[in-house]
Image (cartoon, helix red, strand yellow):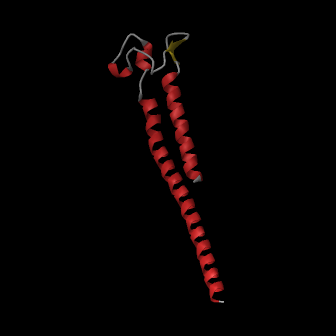
Amino acid sequence: MGWGFGLLAVATLLWVWCGVLLTTPYEIDRAHSAHAVECEPRLFTDDGTANEGPSKDPCGDERDWPEALAVLGLSVPVSVAGAALLAYGLLGVRVSEHAAELARLHELATRDRGQATA
C-alpha cells in the first residue's frame, strides 16, 4: 500500500507540474535582445504555436506542447501502477482481516462444540 500511495503522490505532482506549465506565463530569452520577452500562458492564449510554423510572434515560436504532454503522459503509467498497487494492498489487508475473523469463529465453534459434549 505504501508504494501505491507513493506512486499516486508522484502522479499528483506530475499533474500539478503539467498544470503549472500550462497556466503560468513564461519568459523567453532573445539572443539579440538585452531583455527577456514575457509570454502568455500556453493554455490561455489565442496566438499560434510552434506547430503552425514560423511567426512574427516570438512567443508563438516557443509555445510548443511536447513538454507539457510529456509530463502528462508520464503521469499515466505512474498513476495506473500506483492505483493497482494500492488496490492490491487494500485487498490483501481485507483478505487477511477476513481470514482472521474466520479463524476466530472456527475457534469459537470448536470450543463450543467441546463444551457441549462435556
Q: Residue at x 62, y 89 (%)?
A: 117
Vertical placement of 116 versus 12: above or below? below
Q: Position of residue 107 (x, y in %)?
A: 62, 77
Q: Position of residue 113 (x, y in %)?
A: 61, 83
> 76 and 32: which one is in front?
76
Vertical placement of 37 versus 12: above or below? above
> Residue 104: which quarter of the image?
bottom right
> 98 and 96: which one is in front?
98
> Residue 98: which quarter of the image?
bottom right
Q: Position of residue 4 (x, y in %)?
A: 55, 50
Q: In the orientation shown, which residue stands out farthest toward the bottom? A: 118
Q: Residue at x 51, y 34 (%)?
A: 15
Vertical placement of 50 versus 116: above or below? above
Location of the C terminus (image quadrant): bottom right
> 60 and 104: which one is in front?
104
Question: Is 51 placed left or right of 11 in the picture?
Answer: left
> 83 and 50: which one is in front?
83
Q: Position of residue 71 (x, y in %)?
A: 47, 35
Q: Residue at x 38, y 10 (%)?
A: 56
Vertical placement of 47 versus 84: above or below? above
